[in-house]
Image (cartoon, grey):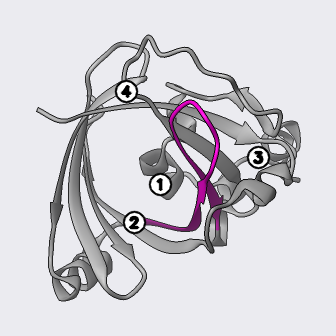
Amino acid sequence: MALEIERRFLVCSNAWQALASSSGQQLRQGYLAASAEGVTVRMRLRGADQAWLTLKAAADAIGLVRHEFEYPIPVADAEALWSLAPHRLEKVRYLIDCPGGDWVVDCFEGSNAPLVLAEVELQSADDSLVIPPWCGKEVTGESRWSNAVLAQQPVQSWSMEERRHYGFG
């Protein structure tokens, strides 16, 4: 069974850009189903030539560890699923050359702009981690920051007070 062990942070400066190992990858994610227990079914398109179907489910109480099952699918199928997905989001993902795990920075577009989140995938939930100075508040396990919830309740739908609180207003 595949496990995803991931910590997430709000990004508080552009200093990460100096560490980006390549140009960004355009991602479109459509959420086809989600349960109150945290199980999601997602399709993802990367650019115009790669697509996956992903099923995720919580594996711990704090949201650090999730079961993840990911399967490549034909791009034409992903495009059809995108058109059927009731909740969607788009972002540009940057791979970051930073020690301690596999780091990415996601720059959200559309109704989630100007949100920027950093994620690091770890080998173990007990791994020690040096958090880069361009990472702000840790949001691991806070459901409002999950991609599935952001697809349903994007930043631009939040109250002005909430947006200002997080620096988006």
Residue at the image position 47 percent from the left and 16 percent from the top: 127
Q: Position of residue 59 (x, y in %)?
A: 26, 21
Q: Quadrant of residue 103?
A: top right
Q: In the rendered view, would you say 121 is above or below 95?
A: above
Badge 3: few (under 14), some or many (20 or more) residues near its Cα, within 10 Å?
Answer: few
Do the CB atoms of the residues marked 2 and 3 lie less than 8 Å apart?
no
Residue underneath mark 3 = 159
Q: CA distance from mark 4 to mark 3?
A: 37 Å
Residue underneath mark 4 = 123
User: Nearer the viewer's eye, disc 2 or disc 1?
Assistant: 2
Q: Please report the bounds of the magenta region as a residue range.
A: 88-108
Q: Secondary structure at mark 3?
A: loop
Residue at the image position 23 percent from the left and 66 percent from the top: 52
Residue underneath mark 1 = 152
Do the CB atoms of the residues marked 4 and 3 lie less than 8 Å apart?
no
Q: CA distance from mark 3 to mark 1?
A: 15 Å
Residue underneath mark 2 = 29
Q: CA distance from mark 1 to mark 4?
A: 30 Å
Residue at the image position 15 percent from the left and 60 percent from the top: 71
